[in-house]
Each structure stands twice: as structure tokens, then as C-alpha cells.
Amino acid sequence: QLDLHGGHNHVVESSRGASPAIPAVQVCVRVRPLLDWECSDGLASSCLQLAGSPPQRITLLPRDGVSSEEELNEKGRIQKPREFAFNAVFGPASSQQEVWDQVGLGNLVCKVVEGFHATVFAYGQTGSGKTHTMDGFAYGPSAGTAPSALAKKPKVHVHLASPEQLGVVPRAVRELFARIDLLRKPSLWSPEGETGESFDVKVSFLQIYNERLYDLLNPATLAVLTSLGAAGASGEDGGQPGLRLRWDAAKEHFYVENLFEYGCHSAECSYPLTGDTYSPVWGLLHTRSRE
């Protein structure tokens, strides 16, 4: 969330003119590489082909990855390769920087600074690479033996990840503060003694599960998640009430009532908020996603 207070409209307007137009909605696909254990038996193979330069189409091949004109499926029906088009397609060898650049996420952050709403979310089944794409942090193995190690879950090491590893969220936060720092400085045409734009940046961490809203930065919620993870529980909220979605008639938008919001003055200040929260949250989310 980005709150803008006061400031000089001519600065914002000048930045608007500098940012290129991007589609209102983009849908992109990233194909993760096969894991070592998936290739160990020699039976796994890719069933996808990428087309275009840069790729914008992906072909789903018939069974066993054979690119034949037609093939019979389990029910004896003819099965052909199927092609799908997207705004961008990223292959197994794609880097975090390529995803950032080709999707135009820097331009999206620019629009946020100008006062527009923006959303980036990853969708896919468990193990498809959403966490790597969105955060890219380094994760350490759980200590101890099962089941205690399973209950603890991996520990996230925010500051051990190299700049190349970082995903969408940390890159967006870094870009956000870089742009804010530029606008905070007085411009050449600003009156003497007048400062630049004023910004307040607040971080929140929200989960939607079974049509209920949970505040993952609320210490009470984290305590419940930690206890549930240690007990190996799933599908329960431990009696923790969900938050309510409200409508603000004055501002004409929805908001989550009583959602914790932490003020941040730098990109580095926001990382520990989500990093320290990931371990207990990851444990319960991982269990719930398996359901």
C-alpha cells in the first residue's frame, strides 16, 4: 500500500509522461525446470514447447512429449498438440531479471507511485515455482529429525539471497523506494526552500483461506499458526477470528478492517517483516495447499 500526501502535481505529471503504456491486464507463464529427483529415474520429460521471439506461445504436447500430429489418449480419442497464447512465456532457463524486464514490472511500480492501483500475483499448483518467482529468498533446511523438523519447516534467510536470486516482491520494493527517493528531492523548478513529494509506505501481509481473511503480521495470528504447525494441524484456524472486508464510502474503495500496517522508510526495513513471518506461515500454507 502506498499513501500519497500533498506534493506537486507537475512532478507526477512529468513522470506520467515518461512511463510507457502497458496493458491493463497481463497474463504470463513461467515454466520451471525439471528437478533432479524428477529426472533421476529417466522417465520424466517436458511436455511443453515455447514459440516466438520473445516467446508468447506455449504448446502442450501429447502424452510422453511426442510431437505427433495426433495420438490416442486413454479413452481412445484423438489427442493433438494444443497451443496457447500469453503476453509472455518464460522457459526453464529464464532468470529473475528476464521476468522483471519482459513483464514490465518496473513500469508497474512507476504507475503505483503516480497513484494507480497495481496487483501482481502468482497462480499455480504446489511445487510449480510461485515462491521462487515472487520472493526468491534463500531457504535453509529444517533442523532435527522428523516429525519435529517437519513441524519447524524451512527457515527463510532474507539477506543470504544474491541480488540475481531476488524475485518480484523484493525487486518491486527496491524499485518503489528508488522512485520515491527521486520524487522526494526538490525539482529544478521548485520554489526556493520547498521540498519534493511526501510519501508514506506501509506494509501488510494478508491471507485469504476458505473465504476468511487472516492478518499474517498480527502477533496473535502468528502464535496460532506456530502452534498449529507444531501440532501438525491443517484446515483449522485455532479459533482465530477472520478479519472483515469493509466499504469506505468516502474514499470509494474496499478495505480490510483492523489489518496491521507497518510503516517502512526503506526497502531493507520491509524485508524482515515478511522474512521473519515466513517460517510459521509457510508451514501452515504448505499443509493447507496439499489439501
Image (tube, rainbow, N blue to C red):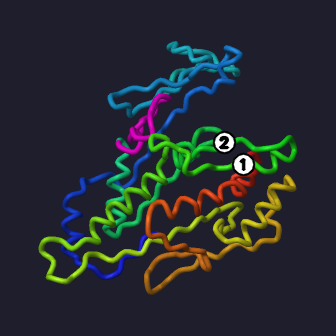
Q: Secondary structure at mark 1?
A: helix
Q: Position of residue 192 (x, y in %)?
A: 15, 82
In this figure, which residue is indicated by the disc labeled 2? 126
- Vertical comparison of 277 with 47: above or below: below
Please tell me which residue is depicted at 27% across the width and 65% down the height of the picture: 182
Residue 87 lies in the magenta-colored region: yes
Amino acid tagged 2? Thr
Q: Position of residue 211 (x, y in %)?
A: 68, 64
Along the viewing direction, whichever of 259 and 245 lies nearer the viewer: 259
Please tell me which residue is depicted at 74% across the width and 54% down the height of the picture: 284
Please tell me which residue is depicted at 64% across the width and 50% down the height of the picture: 156
Give the CA separation, mark 2 to mark 1: 8 Å
Q: Are marks 2 and 1 in contact (CB under 8 Å)?
A: yes
Q: Write the start and end of the magenta stretch as one range.
A: 84-101
Q: Secondary structure at mark 2?
A: loop
Along the viewing direction, whichever of 180 and 51 lies nearer the viewer: 180
Q: Earlier in the sequence, mark 2 or mark 1?
A: 2
Please tell me which residue is depicted at 35% across the width and 41% down the height of the picture: 102
Amino acid tagged 1? His
Q: Specify whether 199 is left or right of 190.
A: right
Which mark lies nearer to you, 2 or 1? 1
- Vertical comparison of 288 with 3: above or below: above
Q: Specify whether 11 is left or right of 89.
A: left
In this figure, which residue is indicated by the disc labeled 1? 286
Give the crowd class for mark 2: few <14, some 14-19, many >=20 residues within 10 Å: few
Residue 187 lies in the magenta-colored region: no
Along the viewing direction, whichever of 248 and 218 lies nearer the viewer: 218
Q: Specify whether 57 is left or right of 44.
A: left
- Vertical comparison of 69 with 52: above or below: above
- Vertical comparison of 73 with 83: above or below: above
Q: Position of residue 35 (x, y in %)?
A: 63, 27
In the drawing, what numbered circle is on residue 4? none
